[in-house]
Image (spheres, rainbow, N blue to C red):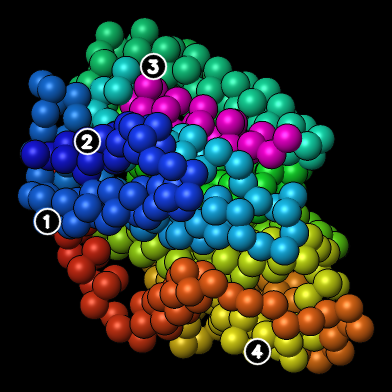
């Protein structure tokens, strides 16, 4: 039963293939609905199942941290399929933005989602690496989904650099295995001894994790891949790769390197500072909205790293703050991308200046976009502000006040380029060619849910307190 969410997702993926063979073309618009139903069932199972237990001789286990990772992954996958439903079913005025092969698209996304779910519960090196590859390889296919030059180039760049990142990670994990002779993550932590080979292995692992999380200086692939991939895939990439990278970093830091975790604050602080600074300042000069969101995602990875600081006193607060902000980021970022997907699908435009006058032609879409962007910037009382407050508190309690100041400055910088989009939507006049276009009920529902969630998560503290209580109890009982 502990593996029920993963099994539901895999069974749903194969069910899509069978249904695709049996139904006529006129009825194939139900395929994304079947995928959504499977993800919803998996989400209920992940929420209702016990919060602890293990399978396969301890190679797969569930605890409160992996439970929350699973819930967040399922929410991200469900929202992505929901915002992609119109494109999968051929709706939208701009035909090149449509996605072909709806069954195969949902199938590959579900297998990627299954890999992330298995990654959250992995407890030995083989399970960890195989799950990570299952959560990575489908993204290469999705990035090259459209049959055009830009999408093919994005897929090629992603697969080359992704293979390089996976090679670094595998080599590093191999070195750590050679030093310990252990496959179980917790067993490795008790057998590690510092030395040249140890630091080589750790450095390789950091490089591999840095690629998954788009940490500076391992971020150079992100902007080109985000711009060239289909917008629906870019939306999923921006949250899926972050979630998988954070789950991988959690396993490395809190399971394999658990005895050394209190000594990693300096390394994490430097990576966080570089990532948020480079991401925010690079976003200022972008003209394409997908490239801007790519550098925005890079800067958000820097903020998320703050949750791994401060291991003395109450270590669970940092992990809880990271999980809470990841949930907020998934909801808020996908709300912004829902508007981008709709706009590019109806007009074929992806430049920031093309959003001028959107509030005149589509006031509710402009409002949803503004709320999402303000949430990413951390404007109160939205959930982004609350999430950043908890993360900044973690860094402050760790004594890294300079990092808190730098993070606050970066949040102010991000407000500049987010406000640039809002200014174009609300102040600049609409072009003569701009006209009102329809919004599907599915997209309107997704935007309503994500917009309300970005507000409710900020004003109702019970969500963070629930995550904090569960993760603190687990961490205190197992590591400290």
Q: Residue at x 13, y 22 (%)?
A: 56
Residue pointed to by mark 4: 363
> Is residue 296 left or right of 115 when viewed as pictured?
right
Q: Residue at x 74, y 44 (%)?
A: 228
Counting residues from the start of the chain, the first of labels 4 and 1 encountered is 1
Residue pointed to by mark 1: 48
Q: Is residue 196 visible?
A: no
Tag 1 secondary structure: helix
Counting residues from the start of the chain, the first of labels 1 and 2 encountered is 2
Counting residues from the start of the chain, the first of labels 3 and 4 encountered is 3
Residues at marks 4 and 2, CA–CA distance in whole angstroms: 42 Å
Residue pointed to by mark 2: 7
Residue 252, position in %: x, y? 37, 33
Density class for disc 1 (Cα within 10 Å; few <14, some 14-19, many ≥20) is few
Residue 50, position in %: x, y? 8, 49
> Is residue 142 left or right of 107 when viewed as pictured?
right
Residues at marks 1 and 3, CA–CA distance in whole angstroms: 36 Å
Q: Is residue 300 above or below residue 438?
A: above
Counting residues from the start of the chain, the first of labels 3 and 2 encountered is 2
Q: Which region is colored magenta? A: 128-147
Which quarter of the picture shows residue 9?
Answer: top left
Residue pointed to by mark 3: 176
């Amino acid at each position: 039963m502990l593996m029920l969410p993963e099994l539901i997702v895999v069974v749903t993926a194969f069910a899509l293939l069978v249904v695709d063979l049996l139904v006529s073309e006129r009825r194939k618009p139900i395929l994304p609905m079947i995928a959504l139903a499977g993800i919803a069932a998996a989400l209920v199972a992940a929420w209702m199942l016990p919060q602890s237990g293990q399978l396969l001789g301890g190679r797969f286990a569930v605890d409160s941290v992996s439970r929350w990772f699973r819930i967040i992954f399922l929410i991200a996958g469900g929202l992505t399929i929901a915002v992609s439903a119109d494109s999968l079913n051929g709706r939208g005025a701009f035909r090149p933005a449509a996605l072909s092969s709806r069954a195969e698209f949902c199938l590959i996304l579900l297998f990627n989602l299954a890999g992330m779910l298995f990654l959250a519960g992995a407890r030995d090196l083989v399970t960890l690496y195989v799950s990570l590859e299952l959560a990575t390889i489908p993204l290469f296919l999705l990035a090259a989904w459209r049959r055009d030059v830009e999408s093919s180039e994005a897929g090629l760049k992603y697969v080359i650099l992704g293979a390089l990142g996976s090679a670094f990670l595998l080599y590093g994990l191999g070195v750590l295995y050679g030093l310990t002779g252990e496959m179980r993550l917790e067993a490795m932590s008790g057998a590690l001894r510092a030395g040249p080979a140890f630091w080589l292995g750790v450095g390789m692992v950091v490089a591999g994790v840095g690629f998954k999380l788009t940490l500076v200086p391992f971020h150079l692939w992100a902007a080109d891949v985000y711009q060239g991939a289909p917008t629906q895939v870019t939306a999923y990439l921006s949250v899926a790769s972050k979630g998988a990278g954070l789950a991988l970093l959690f396993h490395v830091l809190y399971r394999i390197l658990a005895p050394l975790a209190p000594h990693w604050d300096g390394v994490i602080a430097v990576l966080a500072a570089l990532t948020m600074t480079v991401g925010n300042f690079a976003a200022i000069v972008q003209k394409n909205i997908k490239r801007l969101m790519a550098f925005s995602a890079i800067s958000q990875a820097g903020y998320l790293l703050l949750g791994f600081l401060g291991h003395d006193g109450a270590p669970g607060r940092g992990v809880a703050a990271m999980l809470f902000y990841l949930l907020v980021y998934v909801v808020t970022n996908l709300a912004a991308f829902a508007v981008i997907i709709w706009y590019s699908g109806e007009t074929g435009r992806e430049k920031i200046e093309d959003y001028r006058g959107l509030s005149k032609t589509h006031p509710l879409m402009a409002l949803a976009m503004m709320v999402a962007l303000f949430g990413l910037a951390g404007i109160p009382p939205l959930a982004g502000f609350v999430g950043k407050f908890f993360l900044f508190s973690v860094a402050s309690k760790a004594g890294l006040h300079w990092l808190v100041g730098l993070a606050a400055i970066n949040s102010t910088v991000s407000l500049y380029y987010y406000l640039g989009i809002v200014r174009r939507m609300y102040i600049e006049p609409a072009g003569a060619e701009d006209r009102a276009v329809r919004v599907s009920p599915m997209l309107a529902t997704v935007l309503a849910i994500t917009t309300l969630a970005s507000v409710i998560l900020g004003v109702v503290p019970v969500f963070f307190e629930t995550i904090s209580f569960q993760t603190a109890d687990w961490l205190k009982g197992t590591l400290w």
